Structures are given as structure tokens and as C-alpha cells.
Image: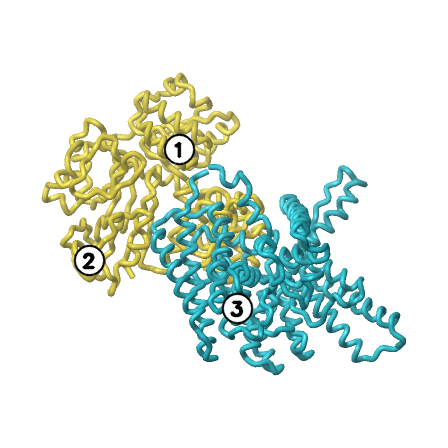
Chain colours: A cyan, B yellow
Amino acid sequence: MKQLNIRAILSILGVFLLIETIAILLCGIASIVYHENVYPLLLTAGITAMCGAFLYGVFRKSNEEIGKREGYIVVSTVWVFFSMFGSLPFLFSGVTASFTDAFFETMSGFTTTGASIITDIEAVDKGVLLWRSTTQWLGGIGIIVLSLAMLPMLGIGGMQLYAAEVPGPTKEKIHPKIKDTAQRFFAIYLLFTSIQTVLLVCGGMNWFDAINHAFTTMSSGGFSTYNDNVAHTSSYIQYVIIVFMFISGINFTLSYFALHGKFSLVWKNEEFRNYLAILITFALLITAVILLHTIRTTAHTTISFAEYKQTFRDALFHVVSLVTTSGFVTVDYLQWPQLATVLCFALMFFGSSAGSTGGGIKVVRLVLLTKHSFLELRRLIHPNAIIPVRLNKKVVPEKTITNVLAFIIIYIVIYMFGVILMSALGYDLETSLGAVVATLGNVGSGIGAVGPFNNYAFLTTAAKWILSFFMLCGRLELFTILILFSPAFWKN
Amino acid sequence: MKIVIAGAGEVGKHLTKILSHDNHEITVIDVSPSELYALSLHLDILTIEGSALSISILQKAKVQSCDLYIAVTHFPEMNVASAVIAKQLGAPKTIARVRDAELLEEKNRLLFENMGIDSIIYPQMLAAEEIKKIVQQSATREFFDFADGLLSLFVLKIEENNDVVGKYLQEIAANKDDFWNYRIVAIKRDFSTIIPRGVDICKPNDIVYIISNKKGITPMLEVFGKKKLAINKVMILGGSRTGRATAQVLQNQFDVKLIEINQTKAHILAGRLTNTLIINGDGRSTDLLVEEGIRTTDVFIATTENSETNILSCYLAKRIGVKQTIAEVENMDYVGLAIDIGIDTIINKKNIAADSIYKYTLDEQNKISSTRSLTESEAQILEINISKGMKICEAPLKEINFPKEAVIGGIVRNKEAFIASGNTQIQDGDKILVFCMPTAIKDVQKLFE
């Protein structure tokens, strides 16, 4: 293997920081509009721009192509760099007391987790709040995809970056050139975000809140500008959020087809069908569990239509929110009957579609796992038969199946490892289970002490750093991060 | 330009590589997922797994909105059929690769055009034509015509006892009369190509690239100590498609012998090639070669399907005393090695086929009318039509910041070809030849916008 091209890595990181500067400056406009202290954002922009320009300027003279290894390192470190610089506004504005808190909040933003340590959100400056939502919006489409769309300079190494960044076991391009593919994805993302903003404004939200919520819905993030998340909002707004959370969990390639009128391609897609089936089944199941519980525990034998509607909406909202790993909440699902809460907990592992903005294991992997397991039984009966796994009527290569199995096993092992770590730090079982699944799956809202209306502020410094690491692991789908810890990667 | 390539074989891969580096939007169709995976790993292209005959696959590859469809799968029938389907689906231009010389004949062209195939290519035939040119222009290693033959590129090797060894390039071109007629545009020395200046010195074993007009050819060959050989006897080793096509184009002009190891194949060849003497035997054996008169042979051409055999047998022939040897080498990594051991000319089918297809991708800009890539160097030769407003026309050449890794070879003005100098002013309507390293192509193109 050839020597690691560190110069190229640093110069690319420099360019990314310059992009981040632009985003920070745009948020600064909000500060000016609302006559707030613009200093935290300006100072951050200044520092970021300087570091970015320095890295780019010093190391730019590298014409060598970047290979696989450089790709993995860039993709992993860019999130850490972004979070480090992105945390400065929280620190400068005094929203968070320590760098740990600020970093946790920013990493939670960029990885679209939505776990927050801010206790009084409504007291925070609007400019900083907008930056907080923007981190999710940028993280949702993927910093790399975003940059590929804007920067043709990344060139050939781009495919490696793209493959490492886009979630899911198989990567599809919708256009021969990565740049054009990324641009189309970005356009779709922008389109949906604008539509949602307008719809939210129609529902009575002010423009500022509407933009923030659209940013965090389309990215399946879950940050809100309200202290009680979206619990107090009208049913119209909640349905709008449900619809756009649902869209954010669909593979972008399918959204692209749908926008081009090719609905049959979307409808025939197995992952999409299973994604839809999971949402509907669990929503109905949880509604039934809650209603049956109400009938059993209260004297009423009849339930009003309004209550049916309310229960179904809450159930659907949380099922969609948890499966897409958004983490928006309207009611405290920990207060639901035990069975419903456990179902919610299970949903946190699912994740949405590959190639979407969501985290988690992803529906397509679960589909492949299920199919493979059932076929394994048939293979036992016919030992000599060749029984391939099919997806969308196409044979799935053995390699992909192995990769999926490895992913799921590693996911579970890391999850258990995380729970043990959290327990070692002194947290109870429920909190440990909840905090790790919420961060590793980029959900944000867990169970136990980190439930829907709780906050991560009370955790110790060590716990916050550990959970930040899990968020990054989850967002980059384990392998990209874990490969950096394998000796083979560093051997020359 | 949007290009769909069906078939990720040798030619398909080579084309994909050079075209995607040229910033075209490439979609590749092939049945083998592993070939596609290998391609997509390094190149920014879209790959589609499936048959080039499947209409749904062709639609998925968006042939209806592409600019060029190229069918180069392993199966000629499939290429023809797939190009026809692609045309019907809306591809404006289609190219199919075939394996039959008969299909290439001019009288059949209309037939294919009516079917919907704009161009038929047969790489082996192209290789044979190339070999024929080299045999006819026997003093050179490679030889290309540009601007309808007004300018030619010669590739020569400097032997150790040559008069020009140790001389400055400006000395070599000192003869005032010939100054306008030819110029060394590049030198290949120890695996790298340099664009020389007047103060560079000629060294033994250099391979020099010279652009010359018609008047310059004879004095130039004289200066470099190359005499046109009187070619009479040609020996071809290997009855592959290239070998057969070569025998076909040479047999009426020269005394051609073809050695083929496989008996059945030799019999078939004997039936088809009426004017060639077919010999059944192993061409790797010196005894057989001597017996068949290799000592009096003028040109030895090795075209077996095995590159290693071709290189080694040419080496053997050279040792025995054949003046000119030509080897077909498919593996690009062997090219440098083959030159090193003294083989005169290397023929690469892939390169030749890709070149002939490449010109179809140039229509868009229209200013570059043809390009050639060289077997022995990574450099490219661009033929550019000058039109008004190009940056290059603004001042005499010495005042223009021309990229160091490129050089203007010749200029054709009013059907008159001459060599460019610092004082030359490029004018509207000129046609110029630029010799260019790949790294400088972008900078060169900027001057012609």
C-alpha cells in the first residue's frame, strides 16, 4: 500500500471548513434580523474560515488522487471537525457551560440524532437556534454529498467518499456523474424542505419556527425550537410533520423517481413496501394496545371518536418518528401501557430506508436478514439446492448478504458494549438501554431517564463523549468508523 | 456528451477510461457484475448490469437521450442487433463492432445506415491497415497522416552510430531550407516523454517524434540516417484475426508467409488467403523460421493471441537479422519492455479501435477534428481547426504563454503545410497540429476557446 496522503486529507478538510463558514454566516443573518448578539456566530465564522483557509492554503499543492483509505479518513474526520467548530456558537453565547456539552449538542445535530443538553431552549438566541437546526439539515443530506454537489474539485476520489457516506448496503447512482447525482439529491432535499416550511406556516407557525422544524424534519433530526418539542402544536402541524418524516425516511432515489412520475417503480420497491407496512402495522398495534388498556383500567366501556383519533395520531406520530429516527415527540410514550412502550423501544432499532436521511439498522437490511433466515430453513431441507436471496426480483450477491449479516451482528455487539459501558458509569438499566439506542440509532429520544421529555444534560462528561462517539458510529454506519480502528488499515 | 457503452471487454474498458477522463457522462452496460464493479470503483460512471439486447436495460441506460451509443460486446451479432434497437429507441448515433471484413466494405455502408448503424468498426482490420502503412513507410516505427496527408508524424529511433547523436536539436534543424519543413516535437527517453527545446541534445536510444510536411520527408529521413527499406518478403506469425486481416491487405503487394500452429486453422486460412503461403508449424522454433527463410525476410509481424509470444518471437527475429519487426501487444504494461528489447513497432488493437471511436465524441466542440494517441507514449496529438476569436490568434506564438508540456507541431494554411516558429501568427482558418501531454490538455484547450 502506498503512503497515506495526509496533505490531501488536510486540504480537503480545509475546504469543508470553508463551506461550514458559509452556513454559519447565513445563520448570522437571523441574529441581525432579530437584533441579537451576532458576536458568537461571527467569531465562530472567523475562526473556522481562518483554520479552513490555512489548511487549504498550506496543503493544497497535492495533485495525487485520494484513494480508499484517505476517503475513509476524510469522511470520518470531517464530522468531528464540523462538530468541533460548529460547537463554538453554543460556547460563545453561553448556552452551554462546557466544551463537552457544546460538542455533544453539535455532534447530535450533525448526526441528526436530536439528543439535546439545552434545558431552556426558548431562552436561546434565535441565531444560535437556527444554527442548531442547520447542523441537522446539513448532516441529514450528508456533508459529503452536499459538498459533492457544490464542489466538482473532489474528482475521482469522490466515489469512495460517496460510498462511505451514503447509508445502506448498496449505493445507487441516478446519473453517470456523482456530481450530478448529488446535485439532484440536494435539489430534492431543498424542494421538500421548502414545501414543508410553507405548509407549516399555513398551519399557523411563524416563519422562524417553520424553517427550523422543516430543517429538522427533512433531516430526520428532531431538534425543536420549543421546550416541549412539538407536543403543544395543532393536529394539522403534527400530520404535516408525520408526512415529511415519512418522506425523509424514503430512499432519495425513489423520491427522485416519484417526482418524475414513475410511481410504479416506487410501489414495486420491496424496501418501500416493507417500510410502509412496518409503519402501518405498528401504528395500529400500538393504538390497539393503548385503547384496550384504557378499556380495561377505566370504568368506561365506550370510547369517543375523538379519543380514537387522538390515540391513533399519537401512535402514528411516534411510530413514524422512531422508525425514521427523527425523535420528535408529542406525548410521553413512557406513560403508555408497558407493551406499547416496549414496542416503541423495539422500533428504535429499525431505522428507515437505505439512502435516506435516517439512521438505525435500515429496513432493507432487516428484509434481507429475514429472507435469508427463512431461506436457510429451506436450504436445510434441500441441502443441494441453490436458493438465492432475491430483492426486487433480483438475486442479491452473496457478498452483500454477508455484509448485511456482519453489520447487524456488529450493531448488536456494539449496542451491548455501549449498555455495559453506561452501566459501568452508574446509570440504571433502562437509562443505559435507552441512551445507547437513541444515540447509536440517531433517534435522540430514548427510554428511562433519557425519555421523550427528558434531557441529556445530567449525564457525566465521560458519558457524553461516549454517546457522541456512538452517534458518529451510527451515522456513518459502523464500518467507516470501525475500519479506522483495525490494524490492517494503518499497515503500510 | 452522454455516451452509452455496451460491453465492458478490453475495448469497452479502454474507451470508458479515456472518455470518462474527458468529462463525458458514461453509462456502461455489461452482463458481468464483477467487471462493472471493477470499473465503477475507479471511474465516475454509471454501470448497469444486464444484456445489451434487453430493451428495458437500454431504456434504463437512457439510450433515448444519449448522444452516442457504442456496442462493443464480445458478440458481433449482439452488437449489430443492439445498435439497431438503440437507434430505434432514439440514440442519434450508433457504432457497432463486428468481426467480419466483408461488412466493412463501402458498398455495404448504406445497408447498415438504413438499418440504423452509423458506423461499423472492426479493430483487427484497423490494426491491419495500420501495419500496412508502417510496412510501406518502413523506416519508421509509427507513422500517422494528418490534414489529408499534408502533415505526417514520424516516430524514429536514434541508433548509437547515428550522426545526430550528441547534437543539439537546433543544430539538427540548422539547415535553413528544412527549418520550415520538419521539427522534433517530442522525445521519449527512459519511459518518459519530454517536449524538447532547442538546447536539448539527442541521445542514443531516444525515440523521436517528428512532424514533417511532404517536402521534408526525404531530407529528414536522411538527416536521421534512416533509409527506406526495400520491402519484399513479409512473414506473419499467428493466424489470429489481426494476422489474417494483415495478410489480406499485404498479400497482393508483398511476398507474404503466414505461420499458424493449429492445423485446422491453417487449412481454413489456406482456403481464404489465396495469395499467401500458409505454413503449419510452431513459430517459436528457430529451425522452422530459418527453414522458411527468416534470414531473407524484411518484415516480421507477430500477431498471435499471446502478447508474450509476440514480443519474444519478434526479439528472436531481430536477433536473426530481420530489419523490421512488428508485434501486436495487448497488455499495455509490456509496451515499454518491448521497446527496450528493440522491437520496432508495437501495435495495440484497443488503442486503435478506441481512437477510431474517439473521433465521434469530438463533434460537439467541432474545433478539434481528430486526435491520435500513441502506442509508445501517453502523449496525444490534436488536430485543431482555428476559428475567429480564439485566444491563440491574439499574438505571435512567442508572446503566448503556451503550456510547457505541449508544442505546436505544424500549421496548414491555404493547403500549404509548414512548421510553426516563435514569430508565427496563427490565423483564422488555419489547421494546426498540437502535440500534447495529457496533463496539459486542459490548458491547451483554454487557448482554443
Judging depth in this view, the residue of A312 and B108 nearest the camera is: A312
In the drawing, does residue B269 fall left or right of residue B433?
Answer: right
Structural crowding at the residue carrying mark 3, measured as other residues with C-alpha within 10 Å and reported as few (<14), some (14–19) or many (≥20):
many
Tell me how far mark 1 sits from mark 3, CA to CA: 66 Å
Q: Amino acid at mark 3?
A: Val
* Above or below A405: residue B222: above
Q: Which residue is mark 3?
A: A95
Q: Amino acid at mark 2?
A: Ile
Q: Which residue is mark 2?
A: B426
Q: Which residue is mark 1?
A: B334
Helix, strand, or loop for circle 2?
loop
Judging depth in this view, the residue of B384 and B109 nearest the camera is: B384
| Residue A358, horizontal then vertical, whole percent | 61, 61
| Residue B252, horizontal then vertical, whole percent | 35, 35
Q: Amino acid at mark 1?
A: Tyr
Tell me how far mark 1 sits from mark 2, CA to CA: 40 Å
Of the two numbered discs 1 and 2 in the rendering, the one whose residue sits closer to the viewer:
1
Judging depth in this view, the residue of B76 and B386 nearest the camera is: B386
Q: How many marks?
A: 3
